[in-house]
Image: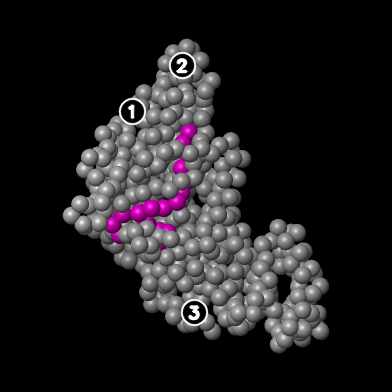
């Protein structure tokens, strides 16, 4: 057994420590020299690339185009939308000067006081303001609409408490920003992209999610409505995994973006924005992985199949390689990513442990005796089940097995979520149940005061008002006032 696995903390002992260790030991990321920022290592970035490529494909299938907007935003732009600046003010990093110089007193390099910017610049925490200032130049008539833009970028939010992938000062994401002629189109866009996110989460990440709308306290700064997908991690905490916002005309009014409608009258443009980030990496890790390391859904695994030869000498290796080559070619022809690890720098046992740690969905081991018997040893990562399969037809078997693994890890996550989702009627019951973790469905009177009271006393928040939830009226568990429907509570990351 490799030393990495011996040293990996068990989830039951310290879930947070298990997560932090796994991110590092599986080669996903590491802390950087910059406070709160991480280095995403090649294996971690390969997973993010698979996510990015699939999402990008889905965005383009829904008519969106990629663009790129500046990293730096004039401070005056951020101040134009009152709720927006209030929501991000505490997280902004500000550029005040544009030059350094050698300190004449010999103290190294210092900021040149004569190089102060006329207007301070904000490193983007999000791009609504710079984009809507740009859209003003693009939109004159209803014929210019809709604009359906997305950008892949990095953003900076000065987080005080950070954890790799889940909450870092700098992170990677995509942000869609669309402009529409009618309210209905903009609302439809926001909900459409929520469904795209849910589709991706469930069918590619194998992560079951609850779709819903945020309460007023939890919505995006400057939005009229924020839609969300909420996932449940193995430790019973929720993770907001993607959001889509109906912005109304707020940013159009802030930046005076109008168009001449079909009646030849001026009107403010309607807007949406939506985004997911490298936080999805955290969701992927915490939903599926175990005490042995990562468990990756085959659709997002950089290496879907690894083949490890077992040999005593170069002659045996050459013989095994002759039989492995057509299997590799068949798998690749099926669109399956496969690695043949015939490097002579590690023992087979170390390789097995390493690929288990990295979450490779299927491992094949083949030795001289297997060649004689026409068999191969197969291990599936999701269950760690070992079997002996026939070499003949192994490519087709692996292809079908990858589909089975994808379905199995989704079902496992869904079953776990179902088991820790409960319904309560009273506040005392809620206080007891929230300590056990998971989702809780309860009645709420709709006021921010009650929501804040619950958060202060239990550290639980309203994750969303489910779009497909229980709409039976009742009484608020805290105040006893009328409640239109149950909402979803949880403690969260």
Query: x%, y% of residue 35?
Result: 32, 59
Quadrant for residue 336, please give it. bottom right
User: Does 52 sit above or below residue 394?
Assistant: above
**Mark closest to the chain's N terminus, 1 or 3:** 3
Residue on which disc 2 sits: 260
Q: Residue at x 79, y 74 (%)?
A: 322
Looking at the image, do the residues carrying marks 1 and 3 touch, with CB atoms under 8 Å apart? no
Residue on which disc 3 sits: 5
Residue nearest the observer in this picture, 150 or 430 = 150
Give, as a single range, the part of the protein colored magenta.
Answer: 159-178
Q: Residue at x 35, y 38 (%)?
A: 73
Q: Image quadrant for the N terminus?
A: bottom right
Residue 254 is marked as 1
Q: Residue at x 81, y 73 (%)?
A: 392
Tag 2's secondary structure? strand
- Alpha carbon distance from label 1 to label 3: 54 Å
Q: Is residue 252 left or right of residue 61?
A: left
Does the magenta portion include 255? no
User: In this view, which residue lies farthest toward the left?
Assistant: 105
Tag 3's secondary structure? helix
Q: Is residue 49 left or right of residue 129?
A: right
Confirm whether residue 267 shows in the render.
Answer: yes
Colour setting: one colour
């Amino acid at each position: 057994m490799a030393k990495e696995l011996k040293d990996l903390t068990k989830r039951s002992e310290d879930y947070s420590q298990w997560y932090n260790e796994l991110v590092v030991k599986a080669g996903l990321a590491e802390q950087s020299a910059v406070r709160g920022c991480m280095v995403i290592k090649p294996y971690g970035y390969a997973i993010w690339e698979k996510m990015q490529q699939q999402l990008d494909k889905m965005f383009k299938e829904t008519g969106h185009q990629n663009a790129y907007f500046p990293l730096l935003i004039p401070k005056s732009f951020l101040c134009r939308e009152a709720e927006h600046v209030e929501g991000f003010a505490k997280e902004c990093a500000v550029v005040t000067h544009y030059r350094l110089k050698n300190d004449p007193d010999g103290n190294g390099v210092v900021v040149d006081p004569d190089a102060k910017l006329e207007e301070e610049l904000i490193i983007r925490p999000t791009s609504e303001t710079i984009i809507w200032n740009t859209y003003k130049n693009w939109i004159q008539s209803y014929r210019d609409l809709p604009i359906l833009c997305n950008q892949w970028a990095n953003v900076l939010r000065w987080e005080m408490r950070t954890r790799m992938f889940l909450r870092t000062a700098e992170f990677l994401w995509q942000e869609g920003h669309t402009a529409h002629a009618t309210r209905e189109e903009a609302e439809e866009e926001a909900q459409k992209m929520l469904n795209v996110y849910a589709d991706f989460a469930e069918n590619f990440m194998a992560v079951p999610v609850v779709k819903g709308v945020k309460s007023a306290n939890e919505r995006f700064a400057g939005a009229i409505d924020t839609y969300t997908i909420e996932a449940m991690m193995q430790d019973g905490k929720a993770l907001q995994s993607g959001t889509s916002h109906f912005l109304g005309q707020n940013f159009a009014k802030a930046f005076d973006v109008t168009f001449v409608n079909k009646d030849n009258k001026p009107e403010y443009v309607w807007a949406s924005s939506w985004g997911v980030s490298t936080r999805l990496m955290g969701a992927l890790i915490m939903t599926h992985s175990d005490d042995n390391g990562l468990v990756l859904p085959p659709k997002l695994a950089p290496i879907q199949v690894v083949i490890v030869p077992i040999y005593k000498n170069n002659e045996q290796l050459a013989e095994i390689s002759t039989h492995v080559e057509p299997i590799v070619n068949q798998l690749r022809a099926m669109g399956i990513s496969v690695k043949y690890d015939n490097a002579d720098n590690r023992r087979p046992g170390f390789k097995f442990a390493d690929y288990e740690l990295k979450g490779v969905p299927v491992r094949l081991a083949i030795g001289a005796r297997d060649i004689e018997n026409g068999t191969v040893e197969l291990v599936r990562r999701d269950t760690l089940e070992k079997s002996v399969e026939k070499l003949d037809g192994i490519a087709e078997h692996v292809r079908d097995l990858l589909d089975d693994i994808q379905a199995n890890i989704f079902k496992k996550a869904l079953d776990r979520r179902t088991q820790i989702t409960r319904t309560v009627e009273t506040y005392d019951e809620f206080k007891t149940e929230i300590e056990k973790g998971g989702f809780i469905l309860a009645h709420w009177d709709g006021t921010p005061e009650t929501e804040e009271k619950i958060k202060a006393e239990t550290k639980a928040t309203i994750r969303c008002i489910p779009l497909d939830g229980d709409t039976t009226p009742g009484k608020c568990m805290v105040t006893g006032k009328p409640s239109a429907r149950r909402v979803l509570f949880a403690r969260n990351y």
